[in-house]
Amino acid sequence: MLRWGLVLLIAPLLLLMGVYWHEFGSVNECILQGGQYDYRLHECTFAVTMPFIPFAERYPLLVNLSMLAALAGFVLCLMGLYSRRR
């Protein structure tokens, strides 16, 4: 139970961080080129100023499921640590 708890605790958060940093790299590259990043279309534009849309607002299902899975992993870790070995 402890191993599954650790997997559920760590894997969803690594996935969430991977998606976030991948998008962050695209945004940073666009800004360094002098453009504005369009968060809705996921592309760099040079025409107009685009509004900032927070990550959690663009990917609510990914964020919420990742946090829920991490919480379930935490609970499984606690159960695995406090249960007696057979």
Image (cartoon, rainbow, N blue to C red):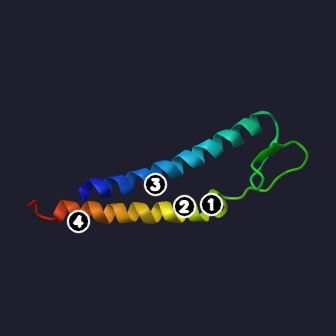
- Report x, y in % for residue 2: 25, 56
Tag 3: Cα neighbours inside 10 Å, few (<14), some, or many (≥20)? many
Residue depicted at x 72% and y 36%: 29
Residue depicted at x 11% and y 63%: 84
For marks 4 and 2, give the CA distance.
Answer: 24 Å
Residue of label 1:
59
| Sequence-wise first label, 2 or 3 | 3
For marks 2 and 1, give the CA distance.
Answer: 6 Å
| Sequence-wise first label, 4 or 1 | 1
Quarter in which the C terminus is drawn: bottom left
Q: Residue furthest left?
A: 86
| Sequence-wise first label, 4 or 2 | 2
Residue of label 4:
79
- Report x, y in % for residue 1: 24, 59
| Sequence-wise first label, 1 or 3 | 3
For badge 1, the amino acid type reads Tyr
Residue 12 image label: 3
Q: Which secondary structure lies at badge 4? A: helix
For badge 4, the amino acid type reads Met
For badge 3, the amino acid type reads Pro
For marks 4 and 3, give the CA distance.
Answer: 19 Å
Frontmost residue, 73 versus 49 = 73
Residue of label 2:
63
